[in-house]
Image (cartoon, grey):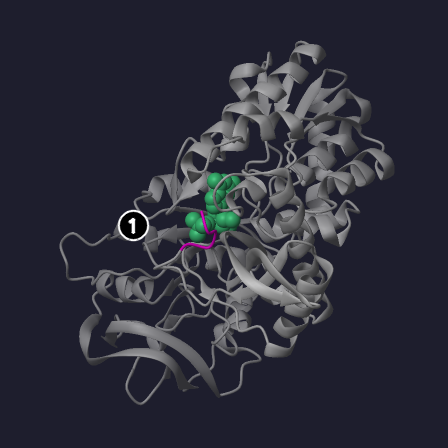
Amino acid sequence: MQHERVLVLDFGGQYNQLIARRVRDLKVYCDLKSCDMTAEQIRAYDPIGIIFTGGPNSVYDAASPHIDPAVLGLGIPVLGICYGSQLIAYTLGGRVEHAASSEYGKREFTFVKDSPLSQDIPARSVCWMSHTDHVTAVPEGYEVLASTPTCPVTVYGNREKKIYGVQFHPEVVHSEYGNKLLENFLYKVCGAKGDWTMGGFVAEQVAQLKEKIGDKKVLCAMSGGVDSAVAATLVHRAVGDKLVCVFVDHGLLRKGEAEEVMEVFKGKLGMNLIRADAGERFLAKLAGVSDPEQKRKIIGAEFIKVFEIEAKKIGAVDFLVQGTIYPDVIESGKDKSAVIKSHHNVGGLPSVVDFKEIVEPLRDLFKDEVRRVGTELGLPESVVQRQPFPGPGLAIRIMGEVTREKLETLRDADYIFREEVAKAGLAGKIWQYFAVITNSRTVGVQGDFRTYENVIALRAVTSVDAMTADWARIPFDVLEKVSNRITNEVPHANRIVYDITSKPPATIEWE
Ligand code: XMP
């Protein structure tokens, strides 16, 4: 089924994926594509509307991305955001100027004229600005629809042509009615019906996978992560026993995780799931190794070897499932031919499996959509809301050599931290939170005895994409409880420290 779709043309702004996610949340499918698409290509794509994103440039720079003016003559509704708005004005003969001073942050703006864009939005509300240039005169035939004291043309448009520009960022949460404005553009201007829902997606994918796979054989590597779990469950829903899953347990997962994978996917869902219990093998390979990059290389290579052994037992298959998701496919709006995730855990798999074709049922979805599909498929919260976890697992949270004893200490400490964060209702507000076992020991006193034991560090960060991160302001009483519990309940830990470094200069993981 061909969904109605919106085209989000990427001019390089930092919120571009966010715009696309908002549109999808409003039940309209959209793709993020490079801004150099021609009018002809756009016509062929056949969108119900086009959104020009923001971007870091000024329309007057020769090197800035511009558009084929014919795009604005296609009769397709257009919404320009920030740079996109300036570009429309510039292209159609309006005026764009450097503002006296850059405007960042919250501003109150006032609608001066009604339009389909302003329906159900109060006359005055708060928006989020981030710009230096702005439109000072609208093109002929266009009207000023909203302004602020310093930004005379905050919103403008032409009702007949269905072309609008907004200087602020409706996609960010600080814009009070930003989502409503996007909804108005989609439903009141573009006439969207809203046919993009996760329930619908599941039904369509299951039908397509059934048709494609039929009674042929499919193989999937499961890591315990959200993407491979949801991809496998979707394929399982479609073809049941034709799917064989291999779960390489490298023994470096958190407490209870490997058991949960087996319980949920084999026990509850009845998947044909093989667990390759390779913990001993990985520990042996890691003995004496303390360099982080070397640990990563060893784990990556070993993972593929173990998977290969299992794949050989299974023999030739027709399809190999990969949990590729939309952000893996797009890179600043340019399609890259990423067929395989760069994630080292699965990156090398195709070379050791005898298969004909790769199946990527999640390739069109953002991460939050993948989670919703997981929920739709009945996966438990613990799987669907799982925080990002590195492929090399706890090996890069154990500074220095990985040993069985350190693994045990770390697992128990980490479990307590996770439990208390969840109890405090903070789990959904923190991007990643985990314990690290530092490679140092300190003197302590426990009971009447002097101890000389491990220092455990707690790491918790807020982030939107892991590219930058800030340390999470976990309340002291929660940290106190975690510290008390770890030192009381976990052997070989006598000191707890909290990491208060942002990224940059640090990274999220310690190694
Ligand atoms: P850093 O530590 O670089 O981490 O700030 C950014 C994000 O990437 C994850 N990470 C990894 N994921 N293999 C992975 O699959 C790795 O080797 C790896 N190293 C870091 C990290 O957990 C965070 O989400």
Any part of residue 31 in sight: no
- In the displayed structure, does residue 245 sit left or right of residue 3? right
Please say whether residue 508 is one of the residues in the magenta stretch.
yes
Secondary structure at badge 1 equals: helix
Q: Residue beneath label 1, please?
A: 70
Image position, residue 53 (x, y; %): 37, 59
Please say whether residue 274 is one of the residues in the magenta stretch.
no
- Depth check: 311 or 147 in front? 311
Kindly indicate the quadrant of the structure image that contains residue 194.
bottom right
Kindly indicate the quadrant of the structure image that contains residue 208.
top right
Which stretch did the figure color magenta? 507-511
Tell me the kind of residue under disc 1: Ala
Kindly indicate the quadrant of the structure image that contains residue 159.
bottom left
Q: Main secondary structure of the magenta part?
A: loop
| Relative height, residue 96 to residue 283 (above, below) | below
Image position, residue 499 (x, y; %): 48, 64
Image position, residue 471 (x, y; %): 48, 67
Question: Which quadrant is home to the N terminus?
Answer: top right
- Mark 1 residue's CB less than 8 Å from ligand 1: no
Residue drawn 28% across the image and 86% down it? 150
Task: Report the number of numbered marks.
Answer: 1
- In the displayed structure, does residue 65 sit left or right of residue 452? left
